[in-house]
Amino acid sequence: MGFENEKVISVRILVTGRVQGVGFRYFIKQTAAQHSVNGWVRNRDDGRVEIAAEGTRQQVDAFIQKVRRGTFFARVKAMDIQMHQPQNYIGFEIKATM
């Protein structure tokens, strides 16, 4: 059975840690492309990064695992992950700070 037959799930993730000013949003966009995850990422005024991600359970789980590891410069302290209704995002974009 291929991915096209699998149910799409949607999550909202709030990432806490050293995640702003270190290229984290670009890492997220690249990671989303690697795992065929659609959605968006943006910095928040409170210092966190917010991510909306959609894909199959397998794609989203793999994406979350990589996000949790962070990058050489970014340090993820905590992630708050909530399930959401799929919005049928196309592609993955970096949004303006909220």
Image (tube, rainbow, N blue to C red):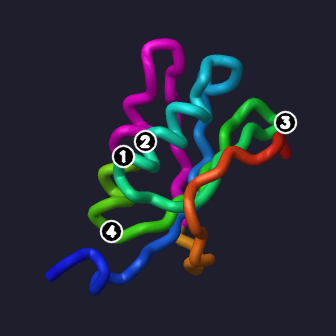
3 or 1: tag closer to the N-terminus: 1
Q: Please tell me whether mark 2 or mark 4 is closer to you in this view.
A: 2
Magenta region: 65-82
The residue carrying mark 2 is: 31
Query: Of the residues shown, which amino acid type is indicated by label 3?
Result: Asp
Instruction: Provide residue 81's location: percent of width, then percent of height.
Output: 52, 56
Q: Which residue is drawn at 20% across and 78% down?
A: 2
Between the residue at mark 3 and the residue at mark 1, the CA separation in whole angstroms equals: 28 Å
4 or 3: tag closer to the N-terminus: 3
Between the residue at mark 4 and the residue at mark 3, the CA separation in whole angstroms equals: 30 Å
Instruction: Provide residue 25's location: percent of width, then percent of height.
Output: 61, 35
Q: Please tell me whether mark 2 or mark 3 is closer to you in this view.
A: 2
Between the residue at mark 2 and the residue at mark 3, the CA separation in whole angstroms equals: 23 Å
Mark drawn on residue 57: 4
Query: Of the residues shown, which amino acid type is indicated by label 4?
Result: Arg
The residue carrying mark 3 is: 45
Whether tag 1 and tag 2 are in contact, CB under 8 A, the answer is yes
Query: Of the residues shown, which amino acid type is indicated by label 1?
Result: Gln
Whether tag 2 and tag 3 are in contact, CB under 8 A, the answer is no
Instruction: Provide residue 82's location: percent of width, then percent of height.
Output: 55, 63
